[in-house]
Amino acid sequence: MDLRPKLLGVNSMLLSLRNNVYIWQSEFAKEMDEILENVGFTLMDFPWEDCELLPNDLDHFTQGGNKNFVDYLVRILEPLSDKKILILADSTLGYWDSTSEIPYDVISCCGVGYTTHPINFRSLIWDMRTQYDIILMIGGWNDKYSPMDMVSRCVERFVRTLSQKIIK
C-alpha cells in the first residue's frame, strides 16, 4: 500500500482519514465520508488492519497497535513535513495519549466529533490563532448517533471556522 497522501500538488488544505473502512464500514461512515468530500476534504486511506485493536474494545488500539498507527501516520505525512500541520483527533490518538510522538501540532480528545457536546472539533479550535497549511482530521465515528443533516451542518460550520481562523 502506498502510504503517501495522494495530494502532492492537490490544492486542498483539508485532509481526513477515511471513515468507511475496515471493521467500521457502515452506511453512516459512507455518508460521513461523502459529507467531508463535499466540503473539500481529501480522504486518505490508512492500513488499519496493521494496527491491532483491543480484544474487548474494537474502537481502540493495543499499545503495539497504537505504535504502528503513530509510525504509519508520521510516515504518511513525511512528504508534507515542510508544511505547518495540525492534527485534530478523537480517541484514535487520545486513548494512549501518544501525541508527543508525533512531530506536528496535535489536539486529541476522547469522545470528540463534529456534533458532540459540550466539546466538538469546532470548539477545540475556537480560540486558536496559529495558522496552518494543512489540517488532518482523524474522527467522525463519534457522530454516529446524530442525524446526518445535523452532521452535515456541523461539518460545514467547522470548515467555515477553520477558514476564518487557522488555515493560511
Image: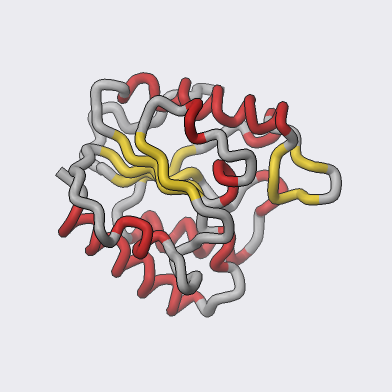
Residue 10 x, y percent position in the rendering: 25, 35
Residue 50 x, y percent position in the rendering: 69, 28
Residue 112 x, y percent position in the rendering: 51, 60
Identified at 22% across, 40% down, the residue is 132
Identified at 50% across, 26% down, the residue is 101
Identified at 14% across, 43% down, the residue is 168
Above or below — where is 37 with respect to 92? below
| Side of 121 where 84 appears, left or right | left
Q: Is residue 29 visible?
A: no
Q: Is residue 111 visible?
A: yes
Q: Nearer the viewer, residue 115 or 125?
A: 125
Above or below — where is 43 with respect to 37? above
Quarter occupied by the N terminus: top right
Identified at 63% across, 25% down, the residue is 68
Above or below — where is 42 with respect to 77? below
How many numbered markers are drawn?
0
**Colour approach in the figure:** secondary structure
Q: Nearer the viewer, residue 159 or 93?
A: 93
| Side of 119 where 168 appears, left or right | left
Residue 138 x, y percent position in the rendering: 49, 47
Q: Residue furthest right?
A: 55
| Side of 121 where 54 appears, left or right | right
Quadrant housing residue 84: top left
